[in-house]
Image (cartoon, helix red, strand yellow):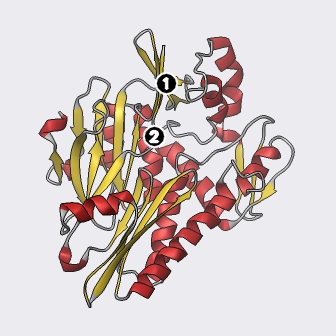
Amino acid sequence: MALTVFSRIATVPWLHGFSAFLAMAMLAGCLHVGTSSSFVVVKRAQMHMGTLVQITAVAATDGTAQGAITAGFQEIRRLEELLSTWIPTSELSRVNEAAGREPVKVSPETMEILKQSVEMARLTEGGFNIAIGPAIDAWKVTEGPRIPDEAELSRLKPLVDLSQLRLDERAGTAYLAMPGMRVDVGGIGKGFAADRAAAVLQAAGATAGVVALSGDIKTFGTMPGGASFVFGIQHPRKEGALLARIVLQDEAISTAGDYERFFERDGVRYHHILDPATLQPARDCQSVTVVAREGTVADGLDTGIFVLGPDRGMELVERLPGVEAVIVDGQGRVRVSSGLKDRLQIETAGQ
């Protein structure tokens, strides 16, 4: 038995228009560049939401860029205080603590992400489920690992029933109707935070930028001189290799993969993306990358599509306006949505 754990860095930003040295410096996490009097590019990194957060801002002055980045980090930290289940005083922790007892008053931000989570669950036919936590704990992918038996998983089924999450927008409350239930927005929260931080950056005067919470990335604007933001999609079976590159503008990207957190036993890979219908690891995909206008949508859909599988997942993508995807199926075949076929550069070295 071998256990391998990966942090969720599924996409890597590469910025056109800079030297190789500068690109590497930006990836490393600390950058302050001003190539002319008309703009500056500033990048800073901090730890938030259990991951490395990197924010790049383009602005007319250094002060504006620095202020925008500071405001972006403050917004992410504010959301973390509301949403992180690792913080006992967060709103979601209080919702979980009150499961089966009483509704809990929540902020508009918490209500919004819970509503978005329910919508992602609807779109993906239950493939995305923020109540799946008890089943993930049973597998202990990053701790044990262990393989729970069917009897244990059957006992957990009622605790992952998302229909038992009751949202009352008028009262501003959230309620988990069954004791022992809990919600965790880790599968959508980073995209949500990236969206909110990008909006704060723009309000603070940044003309372009990138907010990257590990593999959940939101871009806006373009680099000075019209240079684009280019991102590499990680190959799900070749560590350190890129599967493809894509240019983004005013878009978000997010990837879910079975290579992020997994263990292998008797030649079988057991990973953290569970099918809520069976509480077993979803088997029909190796990775799903979603490109959308909003990070919340990209982040929520990638996991749900991974569970749906390549056929139903791509059918969903083709029905949704402004949403594109790259799906690597269980056999390693790459499927690209119609809107990305002319935008995606497949890396032959990664094939």
Label 2: which secondary element: helix
Q: Do tag 1 and tag 2 residues touch (Cβ < 8 Å)?
A: no
Q: Amino acid at mark 1?
A: Pro
- When the figure is inspected, residue 4 is found, relative to residue 17, above or below; the finding is above
Tell me residue 42's x, y (percent).
Answer: 37, 75
Q: Say left or right for 198 vs 233.
A: right
The part of the image, by quadrant, that contains residue 309 is top left
Residue in the picture at 62% in, 63% down: 79
Q: Is residue 320 in sight in this rendering?
A: no
Please give the label number shown on residue 303.
Answer: 2
Q: Say left or right for 248 vs 179.
A: left
Tell me residue 154's x, y (percent).
Answer: 67, 18
Tell me residue 83's x, y (percent).
Answer: 65, 56
- When the figure is inspected, residue 117 is found, relative to residue 177, above or below; the finding is below
Q: Amino acid at mark 2?
A: Thr
- When the figure is inspected, residue 98 is found, relative to residue 266, above or below; the finding is below
Between the residue at mark 1 and the residue at mark 2, the CA separation in whole angstroms equals 12 Å
The part of the image, by quadrant, that contains residue 8 is top left
Tell me residue 19's x, y (percent).
Answer: 18, 65
Callout 1 crowding tier (Cα within 10 Å): few <14, some 14–19, many ≥20: some
Q: Earlier in the sequence, mark 1 or mark 2?
A: 1
Residue in the picture at 41% in, 31% down: 258
> Could you tell me which quadrant the C terminus lies in?
top left
Please state which of residues 44 and 339 is positioned toward the viewer in this rendering.
44
Residue in the picture at 49% in, 24% down: 281
Q: Say left or right for 18 vs 102.
A: left
- When the figure is inspected, residue 166 is found, relative to residue 70, above or below; the finding is above
The residue singled out by tag 1 in the image is 281
Q: How many marks?
A: 2
Label 1: which secondary element: strand
